Image: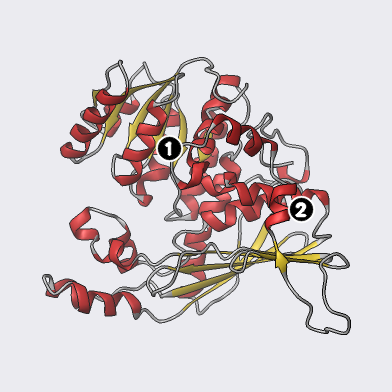
Amino acid sequence: MKMGEAGKTVRLGILGLGCRGYEQTALLASMPDIRIQAIYDPYPDRMDRMVKRLGELVSWSTEKAESEEKLLARDDIDAVIIMTDWESHIRLAIRAMELGKHAAMEVGGACSVQECWDLVRTAQRTGMGCMLLENCCYNREEMALLNMVRDGLFGELVHVQGGYEHDLRDEIGLGDVNRHYRQHNFANRNGELYPTHELGPIGMYLDLNGSNRMVSLVSMASKAAGLGAWLQENRKDKPELQQKTFLEGDVVTTMIRCARGETILLTHDCTLPRPYSRGGRIQGTKAIWMEDNRSIYVDGVTPHLPKDFSHSWESDGPYMERYESELWKEYREFGLRGGHGGMDYLVLRGFIEAIQQGTPMPIDVYDTASLMCITPLSEQSIACGSAPVAIPDFTEGRWLTDRPRAEGPYRLAR
């Protein structure tokens, strides 16, 4: 389907209308082949705000459901977009599939490995699609890097890094005011709470759940000092919050070993002052790329002075241009839209068009479970003194064979 062309109308239900839900629902409403039949959020003011916004954007009407269950039970909905708190994502996706709806979840880690297995089993039993809306897989740079990997620019991959390195002290510290779930997660958990922004693209590079898989991990957490210092300075209005102990370490690092021998390093860093970064690094037998200095070094290609034993970086700009994905070339002609530089639109279209065409989800239930399970496994490792923990094979050996994969412009895996 050419970008911008309308396919068969997909009727949606929306669960969760906080900041993310509000923005994504408006973006979905702008698509000509989408009808948002019903919305639900436990806060009535959020539903009122959304209905008002939709009234400004579209001619059709949207109902406010009385509960999650009543929205999920409707027979005029094909799929559900879940943008609620982290801990309810999998529960709601399972219920949606049980009631015959495809399910898409906004990102976040799971609360237990068991619920990841329950998600996989439900998708297998019902035949419904389940997709994690990991928008970073669709970012221009990440898709160009995937082309570089597939073209052999890096040679054989050896080590890959990524992080969610984002100063969120105000968002977390004001969570009780803004009704944001991060605050109680940081207060009560200690692990890699938000692994998928970095691990989603890394999974593409390493063909995880394709010809490769993650085997084991080890996690370590620093002390928790940054958020407490911020609260002392900025939440004098709430002494009980200033005195509260937050468990989440300021910097959590997780090392993962893959079946083919590659290593992955993840970093979660949200409660210290810093600029935003996803900390990308790809290193192979022929080249290395680093996100933070937007540089690349290709052995035998990148210029460097004779006898300069330290070598020199070059800008990754020309490589990003040369290896730009066909999807992004078409997207730029169509016109970028939506948040996060346009990648929000692409990940939503990947889900919608898979439903329309009856094809596997670009990020399917096995990928979804593998990405989300890192959170409870990292918590387990840290709680046991940074002990090694095995990572389940949610494909149960299907990664060794040619299992069905997505086709078309939104295809991510080989």
Q: Is residue 159 visible?
A: no
Q: Nearer the viewer, residue 16 or 58?
A: 58
Q: Which numbered dot is residue 72?
A: none
For label 1, the residue is: 93
Placement of the N terminus among the 4 image quadrants? top right
178 left or right of 286 in image: left
Using the image, determine if residue 328 lies above or below residue 381.
Answer: above
Q: Secondary structure at mark 1?
A: helix
Amino acid type for the residue under numbered disc 2: Val
Q: Is residue 219 left or right of residue 311?
A: left
In what element is the residue under mark 2? helix
- Tell me if I can see residue 86 in this picture: yes
Q: Quadrant of residue 244?
A: bottom left
* Crowd tier of the residue under label 1, counting other residues whose Cα lies within 10 Å: few below 14, some 14–19, many 20 or above: many
Residue closer to the observer: 321 or 114: 321
Are discs 1 and 2 less than 8 Å apart at CB?
no
Farthest front residue? Answer: 305
In the rendered image, the quadrant that contains the C terminus is: top right
Q: Residue 345: percent from the left, percent from the top? A: 49, 36
Q: Image check: 79 left or right of 199?
A: left
Q: Position of residue 307 (x, y in %)?
A: 88, 85
**Residue type, numbered disc 1:** Ala
Residue 2 vs 214, above or below: the answer is: above
| Earlier residue among tags 1 and 2 | 1
- The residue sitting at 69% across, 35% down in the picture is 405
Q: Residue visible at 28% across and 33% down?
A: 68
- Which residue is at 34% across, 73% downward? 247
Q: Which residue is mark 2?
A: 149
- Marks 1/2: CA–CA distance: 33 Å
Crowding at label 2, few (<14), some or many (≥20) Cα neighbours within 10 Å? Answer: some
